[in-house]
Image (cartoon, helix red, strand yellow):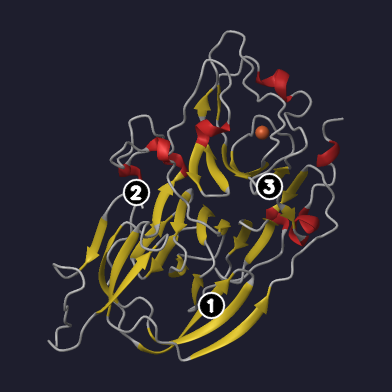
Amino acid sequence: MPFYHKVGEIPRVKHTTFYQPDGKTLYREELVSSKGFSGIYSTIYHHFLPTAVKSVKELGHREDDWPEAPALYYHCYTDKSEKKGNFITARETFLKNHTCKISCARVTEDTNDFYRNGGGAEYLFIHHGTGAFYSQYGKNTFGPGDQIVVPRATTYQLKFDDFKNNKLLIIESDTAFEIPNHYKNEYGQMTEHAPYSERDFRPPEYTEPKTGTGDFRIVVKMKDRFFEHIVPHHPFGAIGWDGFLYPFTFNIKDYHPKVGRIHLPPPVHLLYKTRSFVVCNFVPRLFDFHESAVPAPYFHSNIDSDEVLYYVEGDFMSRKGVEEGSITLHPGGMPHGPQPGKTEASIGARKTEEYAVMIDTYEALQPTLAVKKTIDKDYAKSWL
Ligand SMILES: [Fe+2]
């Protein structure tokens, strides 16, 4: 999405004959388009029909609702969850609403299965682990801090280098993750005051098309239902593609923070927007430089948003008791702010070394049973 990209072989002119080396079999052209035909799109050239499906079976629902969850401040330790599995089955949702699901996954095993979220776009934050993300667009290598944006309906696999310590934060959205318009000029180029530039984004790299035939299993997610699709050709059989719609990677350590004379609110940490929530990156930065500045945030009632933080690394300046892998939820409709002593401790501090991912949703989030299982029971009273 950050810019036009081309990988592999494509015909000189769109929608014209493009033959395989035998001179008589056509490559199959597929347009992957958003917002009907009015949004960004890519054109993919496959060895085989992308529509071929041998069998379909429903795999069921995921039951994780916690309808009795009280209206409270929440803190949970996602690393205390015992759920494990492969990059598909390890996923455990902690917070959700109709437009957004926030999940974690401890990936402890490999699988040959493929995954496709047919109901939404995904953001994958690699907290721990190295490896490669493979899709019909090619290969995106990843390591700690990488954030991969996966367009809706992308078929993909995550291949980890090992299974000693792999942890993902996953955000699903019913609309696309987009670079905010105010970071781009009227021509679509990123401006000099954006917190990143085109150079910081990594598009897919070319990989040899896979032309194997057999039974390939794709787990297809449609909203809350899961299906098994068995397809007769390897899903990554494209010879080439071009366009603006593709998975891309940006590392949290490449986010250039802004600082002010007095405290600046979270919109200065904005990374991506969707129609229903925003994602921000908190990274090491110098604190406010007014002689009497209070670097810790003031108390805040965000009357139209729920605020979620996923803690990645470092000492988080406004929170007590949080650990790497902690999630906090401060619901809209309730004031929130630094815990006792944290405001005073921030005065005179010069910088912070924190890394965190923030999600602010416009629709209220519902904590799931995963929150109930890993909750910090004392957090809601930690302001007393
Ligand atoms: Fe806030």
Q: Amino acid at mark 3?
A: Ile
Task: Mark 3 or mark 1: name the one nearer the start of the chain.
Answer: 1
Q: Position of residue 189 (x, y in %)?
A: 30, 40
Q: Is residue 283 visible?
A: no
Q: Quadrant of ligand 1?
A: top right
Disc 1 packing (10 Å; few <14; some 14–19; many ≥20): many
Look at the numbered disc 3 and give the secondary structure of its residue. Answer: strand
- Give residue 231's position: percent from left, percent from top: 43, 86
Q: Amino acid at mark 2?
A: Pro
- Which residue occupies 65% across, 58% down? 98
Q: Spatial distance from mark 3 to mark 2, Cα to Cα? A: 29 Å
- Residue 286 appearing in the image: yes
161 left or right, relative to 298: left
- Checking the image for residue 327, the label placed there is 3
Q: Is residue 330 above or below residue 8?
A: above
Query: Is disc 3's CB within 8 Å of ligand 1?
Result: no
Q: Tell me which numbered mark, 1 or 2, is placed earlier along the sequence.
A: 2
Q: For mark 1, give the secondary structure.
A: strand
Q: Residues within 10 Å of mark 2 (few under 14, many from 20)?
A: many
| Residue assigned mark 2 | 2
Q: Nearer the viewer, residue 189 or 107?
A: 189
Residue 150 position (above or below residue 339): below
Please state the horizontal and vertical placement of residue 355, each as a whole percent of the image: 55, 39
